[in-house]
Image (cartoon, rainbow, N blue to C red):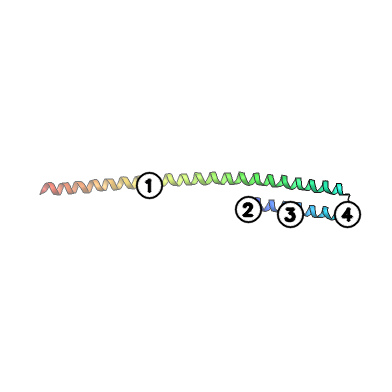
């Protein structure tokens, strides 16, 4: 999804740059003051688009990061439960073996 937003941002920037180039070619036909105003407007629009795109990217990254943390937390909890079960089984097996060893020692 971030790639789509980045591509859209790049495309919008290319369009704005193309508009600036077209405006610069018309400089000879327009007065200097009018051309500077047009260039300034195009630059403002470019800055606005960049800010909006960056805000969207930050939101998407934040959502993805949160999702990754939740997924990692879930996996760690499952692993913890598995380790606790395994440790409990090992403890039980050791206790059974110790009881057998005690039984053998008591018989002697």
- Label 4 crowd (10 A; few <14 / some 14-19 / many >=20): few
Residue 28, label in figure: 4
Q: Is residue 85 left or right of residue 105?
A: right
User: Where in the figure is residue 3, as x and y percent of width and height?
Assistant: 63, 53
Which residue is identified by label 3? 14
Label 2 vs label 1, nearer the camera: 2
Q: Which badge, 2 or 1, is on the more N-terminal residue?
A: 2
Residue placed at 42% from the left, 44% from the top? Answer: 77
Estimate the spatial distance between the alpha carbons at disc 1 and disc 4, rounded to whole Å.
76 Å
User: Where in the figure is residue 99, as x and y percent of width and height?
Assistant: 19, 46
Query: For numbered disc 1, what is the local secondary structure?
Result: helix
Which residue is outermost to the left? 108
Estimate the spatial distance between the alpha carbons at disc 2 and disc 4, rounded to whole Å.
39 Å
Query: For numbered disc 2, what is the local secondary structure?
Result: helix
Estimate the spatial distance between the alpha carbons at disc 3 and disc 2, rounded to whole Å.
16 Å
Q: Are marks 1 and 4 in contact (CB under 8 Å)?
A: no
Residue placed at 76% from the left, 51% from the top? Answer: 16
Q: Which badge, 1 or 3, is on the more N-terminal residue?
A: 3
Residue 1 seen in this snapshot: no
Residue placed at 18% from the left, 49% from the top? Answer: 101
Q: Nearer the viewer, residue 44 or 105?
A: 44
Residue 3, label in figure: 2
Q: Which badge, 2 or 4, is on the more N-terminal residue?
A: 2
Q: Are marks 1 and 3 in contact (CB under 8 Å)?
A: no
Q: Which badge, 3 or 2, is on the more N-terminal residue?
A: 2
Residue 15, label in figure: none
Query: For numbered disc 3, what is the local secondary structure?
Result: helix
Q: Which badge, 1 or 4, is on the more N-terminal residue?
A: 4
Which residue is identified by label 1? 82
- Label 1 crowd (10 A; few <14 / some 14-19 / many >=20): few
């Amino acid at each position: 999804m971030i790639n789509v937003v980045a591509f859209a941002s790049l495309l919008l920037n290319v369009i704005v740059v193309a508009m600036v180039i077209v405006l610069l070619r018309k400089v000879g036909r327009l007065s200097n003051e009018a051309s500077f105003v047009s260039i300034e407007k195009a630059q403002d629009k470019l800055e606005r688009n960049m800010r909006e795109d960056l805000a969207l990217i930050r939101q998407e990254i934040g959502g993805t990061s949160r999702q990754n943390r939740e997924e990692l937390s879930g996996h760690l909890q499952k692993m913890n439960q598995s380790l606790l079960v395994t440790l409990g089984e090992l403890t039980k097996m050791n206790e059974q073996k110790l009881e057998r060893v005690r039984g053998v020692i008591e018989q002697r």
